[in-house]
Amino acid sequence: MPIRWRLTFFNALSIGAILVVLGFSLFLLLRNALLSEVEDTARDRALAAAETVESGEGLDPNEAERLSLGGVFVVVRDGRGEILEQTVSSVPYEEIRDPIWYQALETGQPAAGTADYSSGAPDYVYAVPIYPPDGSARVVEAGRSYEAATKTLETLTAVLVTAIVAALVLSVGGAYLLARTALSPVDAVVRAARQIGESDLSKRLPVRNPRDEIGRLTSTINDLLERLEAAFARREEALLRQRRFAADASHELRTPLTSITGYARMLKEWGLEDPKTAREGVVAILEESERIKGLVESLLALTHGDAGAPLELAPGDLGTVAAESVKAAQAAAGGKVAVEYLSSGGLVEASFDCARIRQVADILLDNAVKYTPEGGTVTVSVGQENGWARFEVSDNGIGIPAEELPLVFERFYRTDPARTEDGAGLGLSIAHQIARTHDGEVEAKSEYNEGSTFVLWIPQSRPAP
Ligand code: ADP
C-alpha cells in the first residue's frame, strides 16, 4: 500500500478512536448528570412533601404548585394504597405488581424505582413511608418523567455523531491531502531518476525544499550522482589515456620493427654476397633492436610504476648518486658537451630507492646532453632546502617553448625541436612517476633557445606509511 494511504489510514484510525472515546465519555457524563438531576429533584420533593404530610398539614394548592414545579407529581396514599391527594389528575398505578409505594410501606424505608405514570418515557418515583401520631400509615410519592432528559440525550447523541463524522471526514481528507502534498516530490524524483542512465549522469533530481526530509534525501542522492559522474569521468579519462598509451607504444615499436624487417630483407636479398652491405644491415638491426629494448624497458618501468611496485627505500646521499650519474653522462657525451658537477661540499641525505633515483638522474642528464648542441655545458648540482633534497640539471641547450613546457611530462610527448633526436618521449614521464612515488616532484624551467633546468625534489624525512 502506498505510504500516503498508510498515513491516511493510520491518521483516520487514531483520530477516529480518539473522537469516539471522547464522544462516548461526554455522552456518559451528560447522561449521568441529566438522570441524576431528575432523580434528585424527585427525591427532594418526596422528602419535602412527606415532611408537610407528617406535620399534619395537607397539601394546599400553593404547596402543591411549589412541589410540582419542573414537571414533578406528588401522590399521597393511605396504608392500603388509596390515593388521598395528588397533584396530577390520573395515576393508573394500581395495576402494577409490587408498586414502589407498597415496597416503601412494607419495608418502612423510602423506596425508589421507575414506573409508567405518564405516557412516553418512564418516570422516576421516590416513595417515603410516614407514620403520623394517629397510628395510620401514609406513603408520599414524588415522581418525574425521564422524557426531557431522554430528549436532550437524543439531541446530544445526534450532535455528537454528526460532529464525530464531520471531524473524521475532515481529518482523513486533511491527512490525505497533506500526505499527497508532502510526498508529491517523491514522484518527481522517481520520474527524474528513471531518466538518469549511465551515459547521462549530468542530470540531477529536483529538490523542492532542501530543508525537509525528502529534500535532504534528494540532495544526498544528487551529491552521490555528482561523485559518480566524477568517478565515471575519471574512468573514461583513464581508459582514454590507456588506449592512447597502447596506440602510442605500438606506434613507437612499429618504426624500429619496420626498419629491422627492411634491413633483414635487404640482407636476405643482397647482404650475403656483399660483406659491406651485410655489416651495414647487421649494425642497423642491432641499433634498432637496442632502441626497441630501451623502449620496452621504459614501458615496463612505467607500467611497474602504475601498478604501484614497492620502493626499496634506504637512507642515502643524493650527492653520490649525482656524481655517479655525471660520470656516466660524461662518458656518453664523449666530450661533445661538457658535463660539470658542482658538489654541495657535504652530504645531501634522504631516504630513497637508490636505483630509481639514479634512473631519474640518468634521464635528466641524458636529456640535457641530448638537447644541448656541441660545445654546450650541462651543470649538475645537489643541495638541501627546508627539509627537501635537491638534484638539479641545467643546460644551455635548445630549450623548450613556454607553451610546451607543461606537456613534457606527458607520456610520448616530444617538443618539435626535439624531433631530430632519438627518444620516444617517455623519459620525463618515468622521472615524474618515480619522483611522485617518493612524494617528491620534478620541476621544469626553460627558455626557448637558451637552455633548460630540471630539478628533482625529494623529501628528506618521509612520513611513516
Ligand atoms: P625523450 O625521450 O624524447 O627525451 P622525454 O620524456 O625525456 O622524452 O622528454 C620529453 C620532451 O621534452 C623531449 O622530447 C624534449 O622535447 C623535451 N626535453 C626534455 N628535456 C629537455 C632539455 N633538457 N632541453 C630541451 N628539451 C627537453
Image (cartoon, rainbow, N blue to C red):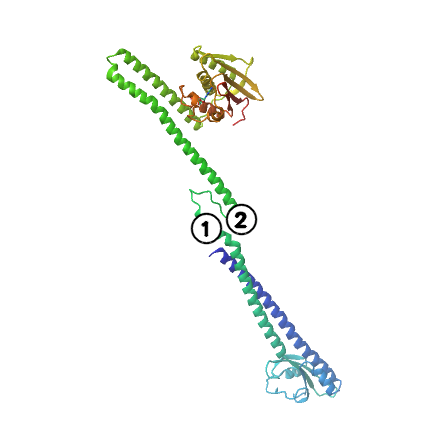
Residue placed at 40% from the left, 24% from the top?
299
- At 56% from the left and 62% from the top, the residue drawn is 15
Residue with the mark numbered 1: 191
Query: What x and y, as percent, mark residue 121?
Result: 60, 80
Residue 61 seen: yes
Above or below, comparing residue 81 to residue 389 in the picture:
below
Earlier in the chain: of badge 1 and badge 2, it is 1
Q: Amino acid under label 1?
A: Arg
Residue 128 position, x and y percent, is: 69, 81
**Image quadrant of residue 430?**
top left
Position in image of residue 117 (x %, y %)? 62, 84
User: In the picture provided, is 291 more to the left or to the right than 345?
Assistant: left
Spatial CA span between label 1 and label 2:
15 Å
**Foreground residue among 407 and 93:** 407
- The kind of residue on which mark 2 rests is Gly
Residue in front for this viewpoint, 330 or 10: 330
Q: Which of 365 and 161 is in front in this view?
A: 365
Q: Report if residue 131 is visible in the image.
A: no
On screen, residue 127 versus residue 272, left or right, reads right
The residue wearing badge 2 is 215
Q: Which residue is drawn at 37% across and 29% down?
A: 247
Classify mark 2: residues with Cα within 10 Å, few (<14), some (14-19) or many (20+).
some
- The percent position of residue 452, horizontal first and vertical second, equals 50, 19
The quadrant where residue 278 appears: top left
